[in-house]
Image (cartoon, rainbow, N blue to C red):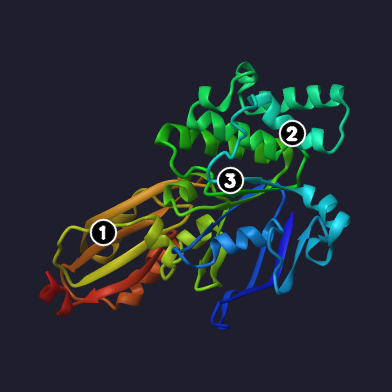
Amino acid sequence: MIEIDGLHKHYQGADGRRTEVLKGISLTVPAASITAVVGPSGAGKSTLARCISLLERPDAGSIRVNGEDLSRLSGAALRRERRAIGTVFQSSALLQRKTAWQNVALPLAWLGVVPGQIKRHVGELLDSVGLSDKAHHYPAQLSGGQRQRVGIARALALKPAVLLADEATSGLDPEATGAILQLLKQLRQQFGLAIVLITHEMDVVRSTADAVAEIRDGRLVQHGPLHQLLSTPDSSLSAQLFPLRPLQGRGDLLLGLTCAPPLATDWISQLSVHYDLQVDLLAAHLEEVSGQLAGRMQIAVRFNQRPLNPQVLIDALAVMGIRAQIIAERPRLQEAG
């Protein structure tokens, strides 16, 4: 487990002006889980990554791994405890003149681990990332996805509790990206890793993360289980992860919907029959996230007889596992259509 509490970091420019990049970030990633950190360029994601790995020291706050506050340590004590954090970089950062086996063995050799133990452990790591047959290949002989697998094996060499993956799939083709993400999910369970996945790719978040943290302007603006955030109508992450391109529709009411399990499969017919209205589905984006169905929809509602208070429909949808938000009401809806 990694616990980040009240993290602050600033830089001072050549003109002496102080710029605060991280503003009180607090985040907990439990063991055997994956938390994705997302946000626009310049939000502070890369600075957070450098602070987590202690490549840069935060100005304030703490970084605890399994209860040990690494931000208070220095010198030999810091080097020893920092082994608890493995890092996978955007590019694999392998040594080109060393084989896959030699690249993975490097951290162990630097620590003075005996050759017999190195041989056994490196073999196990390469097997865990599916590259036993590539042990003696050089990076130039490997595909981009295979090189990243070697980088992951190397990051696990010192048996860390935390794996920091900083844009680990950036630049890979979709097939290689999918394979790497599946590997991370497998390793999360196999080694009980707390994985911090820094990414700008929303497909990566949808398919891999258990939880998500959104950073904007150095602040943590949203954080929680992925399926929970996605089923919250006013969550900006829901709109980013499930973009909609609704058809043009007319009606008395335009509703934006987010769904969370359990979701009734016949919710449209239930709504139509019970309240004597017509429902047009204008757009939908549903996917399985963390083993549960989540997504967004947009509907236009037309009342056949008398109009209803929109809150009645919102409450009825909530019972079916759907949260609704009013986008437009007549006459604005018809004017927009």
Can residue 81 be seen by looking at this rendering? yes
Image quadrant in which the N terminus is located = bottom right
- Judging by the rendered image, the residue that carries numbered circle 1 is 273
**In front of the other: 96 or 292:** 96
Which numbered marker is on residue 25? none
Depicted 85 relative to depicted 153: above or below: below
In the rendering, at what x and y percent does residue 209 appear? 55, 49
In the rendering, at what x and y percent does residue 314 appear? 36, 70
**In front of the other: 105 or 241:** 105
Residue 278 lies left or right of residue 145; in this view the side is left
**Amino acid type for the residue under numbered disc 2:** Leu
Which numbered marker is on residue 106? 2
Residue 58 quadrant? bottom right
- Judging by the rendered image, the residue that carries numbered circle 3 is 89
In the rendering, at what x and y percent does residue 256 appear? 32, 66
Residue 105 lies left or right of residue 238; in this view the side is right
Mark 3 to mark 2 CA distance (whole Å): 16 Å
Q: Are marks 1 and 3 in contact (CB under 8 Å)?
A: no
